[in-house]
């Protein structure tokens, strides 16, 4: 392969690539429909011209036929009058008009065939244009949908979904920690209340037991015993009483340390 062929191929490849990139489906479809519409206009003009020519040929044919009939009648008239030469001349004119009519009839048949062909082509082109318009609208809608989807994919591609999902996971973990902390505080508050009530209940039992011990140590207080005790003994404490008091103080100290 020569250098010129290689360069030519590269140039053509680049040009084709540029043309392909520059092709907008909507514009190309619009231009195609426009071109077909222009062809339709030209074809209609051709059909109209062919029909007009056919009508002129038909008029000429009718006129030639009429002239041939007239010369035939004249030939008959001349022959009836005994003018054989004039009749011969009339028949000669008749033959010329008949030949002309026959030629026009051949041309008229050809024109009729041509007009029929043009009419069929016209109908076919109109159908193609209608189909092209429908397909154009459909392809335009598909192109717009594809372009919108491409733009959407571009937008979605630019979003950092991994970072966003990581943020959601972090926030979910934080909420779980907050809920766990709230539940723990609630449990601690309930445990504190239970401990307080337990302390109250245990304290009541100790007080009751202490009161019972005091009653046992002191014995029942009667008016007779109180009257027999001298006033000095009532005010002074005996060694036994001091021992009881010491024992009570020790119990209080132990209770405070609990």
Image (tube, grey):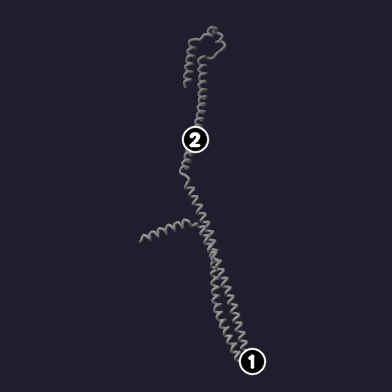
- Number of numbered labels in the structure image: 2
Disc assigned to residue 178: 2
Residue at 42% from the left image edge and 57% from the top image edge? 14
Position of residue 256 relative to residue 133, above or below, is above
The secondary structure type at the circle numbered 2 is helix
Q: Is residue 28 left or right of residue 81?
A: left
Disc assigned to residue 249: none
Determine which residue is flagged by label 1. 81
Most foreground residue, 141 or 108 = 108
Q: Characterize the local packing of mark 1: few (<14), some (14-19) or many (20 or more) Cα atoms within 10 angstroms.
A: few
Q: Mark 1 or mark 2: which comes first in sequence?
A: 1
**Whole-percent x and y of residue 183?**
50, 34
Position of residue 83 relative to residue 33, above or below, is below
**Whole-percent x and y of residue 117?**
53, 72
Residue at 54% from the left image edge and 73% from the top image edge? 114
Which of discs 1 and 2 lies nearer the camera? The answer is: 1
Query: Which quadrant holds residue 3?
Result: bottom left
Residue at 55% from the left image edge and 78% from the top image edge? 107
The secondary structure type at the circle numbered 1 is loop
């Amino acid at each position: 392969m020569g250098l010129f062929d290689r360069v030519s191929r590269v140039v053509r490849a680049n040009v084709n690539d540029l043309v392909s990139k520059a092709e907008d489906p909507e514009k190309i479809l619009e231009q195609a429909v426009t071109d077909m519409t222009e062809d339709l206009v030209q074809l209609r003009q051709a059909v109209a011209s062919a029909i007009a020519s056919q009508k002129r040929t038909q008029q000429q044919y009718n006129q030639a036929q009429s002239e041939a009939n007239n010369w035939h009648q004249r030939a008959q008239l001349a022959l009836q009058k005994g003018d054989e030469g004039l009749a011969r001349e009339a028949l000669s004119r008749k033959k010329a008009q008949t030949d002309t009519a026959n030629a026009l009839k051949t041309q008229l048949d050809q024109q009729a065939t041509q007009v029929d062909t043009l009419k069929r082509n016209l109908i076919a082109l109109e159908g193609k244009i209608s189909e092209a318009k429908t397909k154009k609208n459909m392809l335009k809608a598909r192109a717009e949908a594809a372009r919108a989807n491409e733009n959407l994919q571009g937008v979605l591609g630019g979003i950092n979904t991994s970072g966003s999902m990581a943020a959601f996971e972090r926030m979910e973990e934080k909420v779980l920690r907050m809920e766990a902390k709230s539940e723990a505080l609630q449990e601690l508050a309930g445990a504190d209340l239970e401990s307080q009530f337990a302390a109250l209940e245990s304290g009541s039992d100790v007080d009751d037991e202490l009161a019972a011990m005091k009653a046992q140590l002191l014995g029942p207080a009667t008016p007779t015993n109180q009257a027999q005790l001298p006033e000095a003994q009532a005010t002074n404490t005996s060694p036994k009483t001091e021992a009881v008091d010491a024992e009570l103080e020790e119990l209080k100290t132990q209770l405070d340390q609990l």
